Amino acid sequence: MKRPRDAVGALRAGPVCLSVLGFFLAAFSPFSSQPLRSQTPPGPEVVAHVKAGLQARREQRYADARRELEAAVKLAPRIAEIHLNLGLVYHEQAEPELAVGALGKALALKPEVKGARMLMGFNLLALGRFGPAAEHLEKAYQEDPTPQIGYWLGLSYLNSGRPREAIPRLEEALEEQPENADLLYYAARAYSAVSAQLRLTLLRTAPESARARQATGDDHALNGRMDQAIVEYEAALERTPQAVGIHRALGDLYREASRLEDAARHYELELRLAPGDLETNYRYGSVLLLLGRSEDALGYLRAAVDGDPTNTEALFGLGKALFDQSDLGAAENAFREVLANRPTLQQAMSSHYEIARILRRRDMPEAAAEHLNAFRKLRGQLIRADQK
């Protein structure tokens, strides 16, 4: 039996498993406690087919289950639960089109039949029918607001052009599986789509405002058009000189272009508008450090670290500034804090090297050698990673 088209890149129908998130619909059946429910009791032949179909399904003999339940449907076409179980078997056989047909009949007969809307929504999602999928999954989520149904509902919203509604459902699922790659990807897509929508609204409603010109500048900067980005940022500042964030954006551009004096000037102007901005404090301090002004950099780097003691970049910069000022004990502490805060491989390697330098100056050759060895090992890892 061939697998269905992977409609959204995260859902693959297969025996029992409903989602790459690892949620399973194991032994699902409305017949588990009451084999059949209808106003007119079914005859013994129908009951026999249903029992045989459910037993075959429990044993994962899906072809036999399908045959028995299809026979039961022909004999008793007005019993919603038989259609529902047949739809489940179609789903497990990776036949979403057939599953949707059977589940649609179950819902037509009994709109409140348990489990049908969840399965219907999932199979519509797998078929790429995102709007109808969302309708069914909304009702399923109201009945059973679980993260797995919320995930499918979020995907339906995202793929039907409703990213704002997708975000809370995807975030809810991320709380349970914060490192799930599919969830992270779809949440990022949803936020990106919302950002694009808001940007278009801004450009449409206030095209000559400072923020509209800033948004245009951001787009140029993102695509490497530095000169055009600068023009837009400067135009934004002409309209609203006190607009927060624009000087920092200009500082970033100039820093990337190695125009450090210009970068420092704009970071300083940004801090006049937002003196408590931790990131700008770090960036200004780091540029001052590159300019050889370590004494001036200290205050800004300390502000960044005091505001966020886990900022390994700011901690490393602070260590460098302290080293340049010959405050070796404080510098060593800063580099050790970098190592204690889950640094990148590059940051860890550089911190070990700086600690080794400090320990050599303090006439501690054995301790320095340990850190130099750690530096060499990490450098080897980086070289191997670059070669792959």
Image (spheres, rainbow, N blue to C red):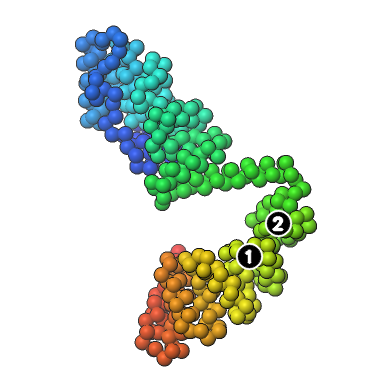
* 232 horizontally vs 23: left or right: right
Q: Quadrant of the C terminus?
A: bottom left
* Amino acid at the residue labelled 1: Pro
* Residue at screen point 66% across, 58% down: 245
Residue most extreme to the bottom? 363
* 130 horizontally vs 32: left or right: right
Q: Quadrant of the N terminus?
A: top left
Secondary element at tag 2 = loop
* Residue at screen point 46% across, 44% down: 171
The relative height of residue 313 versus residue 209 in the rendered view (above or below) is below
The relative height of residue 192 versus residue 32 in the rendered view (above or below) is below
Q: Is residue 160 visible?
A: yes
* 249 horizontally vs 158: left or right: right
Q: Position of residue 275 (x, y in %)?
A: 63, 65
Q: Looking at the image, tell me whether mark 1 or mark 2 is earlier in sequence order.
A: 2
Identify which residue, 146 or 366, lies in the foreground. Answer: 146
Which residue is identified by label 2?
243
Which residue is identified by label 1?
275
Q: Position of residue 305 (x, y in %)?
A: 52, 69
* Residue at screen point 39% across, 89% down: 365
Q: Please identify the quarter of the rendering in which residue 290 is found.
A: bottom right
* Amino acid at the residue labelled 2: Ala
* Residue at screen point 48% across, 80% down: 330
**C-alpha distance separating marks 1 and 2:** 13 Å
Q: Position of residue 276 (x, y in %)?
A: 60, 64
**Viewer-nearest of labels 1 and 2?**
1
Secondary element at tag 1 = loop
